[in-house]
Amino acid sequence: MAKYILKRLLYMIPMMFIISLLVFVTIQLPPGDYVSTMIEEMRNLQGVNWTPQFEEAMRERYGLNEPILVQYGKWIGNIMLHGDFGYSFQNNAPSQEIIWDRLGMTVLIALASFIFSWMVALPIGIYSAVRQYSIGDYIFSIIGFIGMATPGFLIALALLYLAFSQWGISISGLFSTEYADAPWSFAKFIDLLKHIWLPMVIVGTAGTAGLIRIMRANLLDELDKPYVDTARAKGMPEWRLLLKYPVRHALNPFISTLGWTLPSLVAGEAIVSIVLNLPTTGPVYLQALRVQDMYVAAGFLMLLSFLTMMGTLLSDILLAWLDPRIRYQ
Amino acid sequence: MKLRMMLLVVLIAVLALPISPITAQEGMTYSESPMLAERVAAGELPPIEERLPENPRVIEMPWAEIGTYGGELRVPFGGDSPFWGGQMVFWSAWRGLVNWNQEYTDWVPNLAESVDVNEDASEYVFHLRQGVKWSDGVPFTADDIVFYIEDIMKNDAINGGNFPEGWLLPGEVPPVAEKIDDYTVKITFDVPYGMFLLNMAGWDGWQMTAAPKHYLEQFHIDYNPDGIDELIAQNTAASDWVSLFQLKTAVGPGSDQSVVMRDVEYPTLFPWIVVQPLGSGTQFIAERNPYYYWVDAAGNQLPYIDRIVETAYQDEETLLLDVLAGKFDTMPNPANENRPLFFQNAETSGLEVYILPREGGGVVSIMFNLTHPEMGELFSQKDFRIGMSHAIDRQEIVDIVYFGEGNLRQVSPNEDSPLYNEQLSTQYLEYSVDLANEYLDKVLPDKDADGWRLLPNGEKLSIVFTVQTGDYGLNFLGVAELLKEYYAAVGVDIILDVVDNDIWSNRRDDNTMEATIYTGEGGVGITSIFDSRYFVPNSGSQIRGNAWAIWYLEKDNPAGVEPPQHIKDQLALMERVRQAPTSEERIELMQQVLQVAADEFWVIGIASPPTTFRPLNAKIANVPESWIDGWPVGGVAIAVPEQWYFTE
C-alpha cells in the first residue's frame, strides 16, 4: 500500500510540471497584459498620457518584455525554490498571500458542502432504490432533478430575496459586520456557524442531486443480484443485509467521483460566493482573470489542478481500501 | 457611558460658546471627539491645540449646524478596488491646496491660505496654512510639494525619461517648484497657465498634497543612498529602488493610488485615514484623522463621524438587497431604475433619498469617428451629422430610457452657465424624418431596393456602433437600441456591437471604432472649460476626433493622425483658454471655442442629464438638501461629509 501511494505521488511530479507549463501558456493567451491595463487606467483616471518610454520601463519592471520561456523559467523556479508564486500587480502583494488568505474559508465551505451532500445523498439514494417507485421516491426524484437543473447562484439569489421580502433581513456574507475583521474567538465561531449553513446548502445542493441519482441507480443494479437473495434466504435482517453488501458495492462509483468533487466544489463556489459575498477564493480568481493579474490567476489554476490530482489519488486509495478486489497495479 | 461622555463634551462645548466669542482664528478654543480625548488622556496623542494648525480652516456651511461626535458610517461598494470602491474615503480626498466653491465657478483656498499669481499666470506662490500636519503628526510643508514635483515627477528613473504629459505640463518644459520658506512654495511654468488652480481644485490636485516627503524619502535613492539596498532586499517584489519607490508611493508615474487605502503606514491629509485595509477580508475601516485641519464654527475639530466601515461586494444585486435590508448608511452610485425601491423600503432601510442634479452638458453623446480610416470621410460631412440628428426622436428616448426626465438639447453648457451658447444647445433638435432624409440625400443619395442607403462605391452603408456595457448608470444600450430604429427609418443601417469596457478602450486606442455612445460632460458652471472633450478633440474619451486626440496627446503613438488646420486652430484656441490669466479672458476665449463647436456640430446630444440620487441614513444631519453630482466636481465631497453627524 505504502509503495503504491509513493509511486502515485512520484507520478504527480512530471504531471504537475506539464500542468504548470499549460497553465502559464493559457494565462499568456489573452491579448494585452497587466501593463496595458495599467496604462489604460492612467489614461482614463490619472490625467497622465502614454509615452513609449514609460510603457517600456513598466514592462521592464514587471519582467513582461522577456521571452515567454524565460518568464516561465523564473516563475516556476521561484515557486520550487522559494514557494514564491509571483507578484500580484493589482494587490501590490505576493500572490501566495492573496491565495492562502482566502483558501481557509474556501476549504471550509467546500468540506462542509461535501459532508452535507454525502449525508443527504446517501440515505436518500438508498431509500429511493429500496422503495423504488414509491411516493417518497418520486418526491425525492423531483427535488433531485430540480436541484440538478438549477444553478447554485440562482438558488442563492432566490433565498436572499425570500429572506428579505418575508422577514426583511439580509443573509449574505460569512460573518456579521462586527466579526468580519475581528480576531478569532468563540463568539466569532458561533457567528460563522450562523452564516455558513446557507453557502453549505447551496454549494452542496447541485452535487447532492447528482449523487442521489448515482446511488439509486447503482443500488438498483445490485439489489437484484443473486447474492442478495441468498443472504435474505439465510434469514439476514433486511437493513443489515442492505448496508453490508449491496450498498458497499454501490459505493464504488461514488468514491471514484471524489477526485473531481474537490476541485468542482472549490471552483463551483466561485459564482455562489460572488452572489453571497463570501470571503473565499472564487471572487479573487475571477477578478485576477479580468484585470490580467496573471500570477494570481496562474496560482489559482495550479492550485485547482493540484486539488484534482490529490482528489484522484485519494479516491483511488479509498477505493482500494474499500474494495479488496482492486489491485495496486 | 460613552454616550454620557459625549453629551458631556457637547454640553461643555455649548457652555463654552458664550464665554469664548467666535472670532474665527484668534482666541478660538478647540474641542475634539471623545474618542481622541481618550487617546490624549492616555498619552498617545498630543492635545488638540498642538494637533491643529495655527489657523484651522473654519467651515460654516449655510445648511449646517454644530454637530455631535461619534458613530460609524457603514458603506458598501462593488468590486475589489478599495480606492474606487471606498468612495466615502476617496471623495473626501478631494481637498487639495485649493478647492471648488459651492457653485463650481471658482476656487477657494484650502491647504493654501492664499495664492499670489503673477501677471501672465506663469508663476504661482502658495502660502500654506501653517502647522497643518500629516496623519502621523509630522508637519505638512513646502518640502512636500517640492519633493512631489522635483524628486518624483521629474526623476528620470521614475518617469522613464520623460516628464509625464498632463496637467502639470502646459508647455514644453516641466514646471519648477521652489521652496521659499517652510510655508511658502513657488511653482513656475514656462508658459502662462491660468487654469492651474482650477485644475488643482479638481481631481488632479490631490496628488500634489499626497506625497509625504518624510515618509517617502526612505525609498528614494537621492535621500537614502546607504539604506536603500537593505529595503530593496526586504521587499520581494522590488528589484531596484525605482520599483520599490513605485510600490510605496501613491502618486507619481507608475504608482498605484490605492496605496493610500492599502498601506496603513502611508501618511495622508484626508479627514478619515485607513486603519485596517481591505486585505483578504471583505471590509476595510477608516478612522478619523486626529490631525485633520478643519473645525466648525464652534471650534470642534471635524469630522464628526468617527469611523467609516466599507464592505466589498461582488454582486450589485446582493449589495442593493443588503442596503435595502438596512445594513448600511448610504450607497454609492445607485441606478436610477432602482429609485422606487428606496421609497418602497424606506422603513427597513432607514434611508432618506436625496435627489441630485447631475453635472453634465447632456445625458449621453452620440459620436461618429471623423478620423476613422474608411468611414471618416463620410462622417466629416456636416450634412450627414445634421441628418442623423434630425432622425432622432429625442422625446421618446427621454420617456422610455430616462423615465421622462430631461429637456431636449445638444451637449452644451447649461442655460444658467456663463458659457451658455444657445446655438450649440438648441440646433438640429427637431425630430423629422423628412428633414433628416433631406440632409442625408445630399450626402448619400443612392439607395438599394430595400431602401438602405449606399456608399459612393455602391456598397450598402452599415455603421458599427460600439457600445460599452459599463455605462455609469446612463443606459447606453437602451439609447442605442432606439437609435437603430430611428436610423433604419432614414435608410441608415446600424450594427450594434455591445462590448466590455476594455474592448471599447482597445478599439479606441487602435482607432477602429466607427461610432459610439458615451457620457456628456461640460454642463454646470464652467466645468466645460476643464472637461472640454466634446468641444475640442483633446481627450481620449471622445471618439469623434479620436486619432487627432491621440496625435495631440501622445506624439509618438503611431495611431495618431495629424488633424486638418481648422482642428489645429481649435486645439490652439483651447490652449489659450488654459493659459488665460484672468477669469474674464478665460470665459471669453471659451465662448469662442464653444462657438466653433456649435458651427462644426461634431457631437450629437439627446437631452439634459436626468437627476440622480443618493440614499443616506435618515438619522444623519447636516446634509444639504441637494448638491451637484459629478466627476469633475468631486462627487459627494461637495456635500461636506466632514460635517455630517448622527442625530441619535
Image (cartoon, coloured by chain):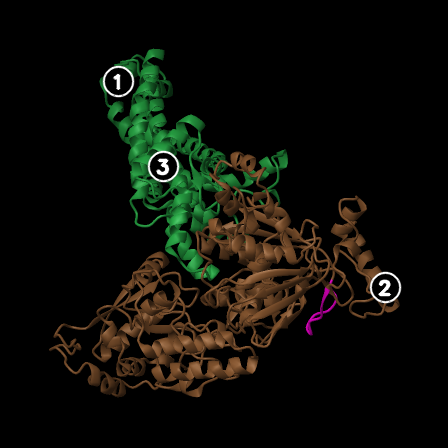
Colour given to chain A in the rendered image = green
**Label 2 packing within 10 angstroms: few (<14), some (14-19), many (20+):** few
Estimate the spatial distance between the alpha carbons at disc 2 and disc 1, rounded to whole Å: 96 Å
Q: How many marks?
A: 3
Disc 3: which chain?
A
Residue A27 at least partly seen: yes
Q: Which residue is mark 1?
A: A229
Disc 2: which chain?
B
Q: Which residue is mark 3?
A: A301
Say which amino acid is labelled 1.
Answer: Asp
Q: Is residue B489 left or right of residue B505?
A: left
Residue B550 image position (x, y, % from top left):
35, 65
Q: Does the magenta stretch mainly form a helix, a strand or a loop?
A: loop
Q: Which residue is mark 2?
A: B16
* Start-end of magenta stretch: B57-67
Say which amino acid is labelled 2.
Answer: Ala
> Which residue is located at x 32 percent, y 19 percent?
A10
> Which residue is located at x 47 percent, y 77 percent?
B576
